[in-house]
Image (cartoon, grey):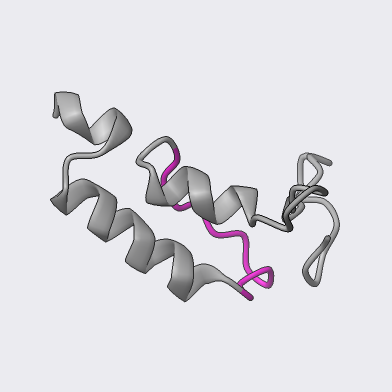
């Protein structure tokens, strides 16, 4: 699924990924589990607040990549 723009200025594809079997929002789950951080490409900001909140919680709980910091 895409937001406002399909690609960034370097022609990289920007997409939200949902798992077919259960509809899980993969982008958000990666951030929640501490295996991704937030990088926003305005005007694609539909889930920016959710990602920011999830990233802060993962850092606070020292999950995933944050465990070594």
45 over 65 or under it: above or below: below
In the image, what residue occupies the spot 30% across and 29% down? 65
Q: Quadrant of the C terminus?
A: top left
- All told, the count of numbered labels is 0
Quadrant that contains the N terminus: bottom right
Residue lying at 46% horizontally and 62% vertically, measured from the top left: 51
The percent position of residue 67, horizontal first and vertical second, equals 18, 30
- In this rendering, position of residue 23 left or right of residue 53: right
| Residue appearing at x 76%, y 52% in the figure | 15
Residue 40 location (% of width, % of height):
54, 59
Q: Main secondary structure of the magenta part?
A: loop
Nearest the eye: 6 or 68: 68
Residue 14 is situated, as x and y percent measured from the top left of the image, at 76, 50
The structure residue drawn at horizontal position 79% and vertical position 48%, both measured from the top left corner, is 21
Please state which of residues 57 and 6 is positioned toward the viewer in this rendering.
Answer: 57
Q: Which residues are magenta?
A: 36-46
Write down the quadrant of residue 43 in the picture.
Answer: bottom right
**Residue 44 is inside the magenta segment:** yes
Relative side of 46 to 62, left or right = right
Tell whether 6 sits left or right of 14.
right
Nearer the observer, 11 or 64: 64
Residue 65 colored in magenta in the image:
no
- Residue 38 placement (x, y as % from top left): 45, 52
């Amino acid at each position: 699924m895409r937001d406002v723009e399909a690609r960034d200025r370097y022609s990289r594809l920007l997409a939200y990924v949902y798992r077919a079997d259960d509809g899980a929002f993969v982008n958000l789950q990666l951030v929640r589990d501490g295996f991704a951080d937030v990088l926003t490409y305005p005007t694609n900001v539909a889930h920016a607040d959710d990602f920011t909140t999830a990233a802060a919680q993962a850092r606070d709980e020292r999950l995933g990549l944050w465990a070594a910091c």
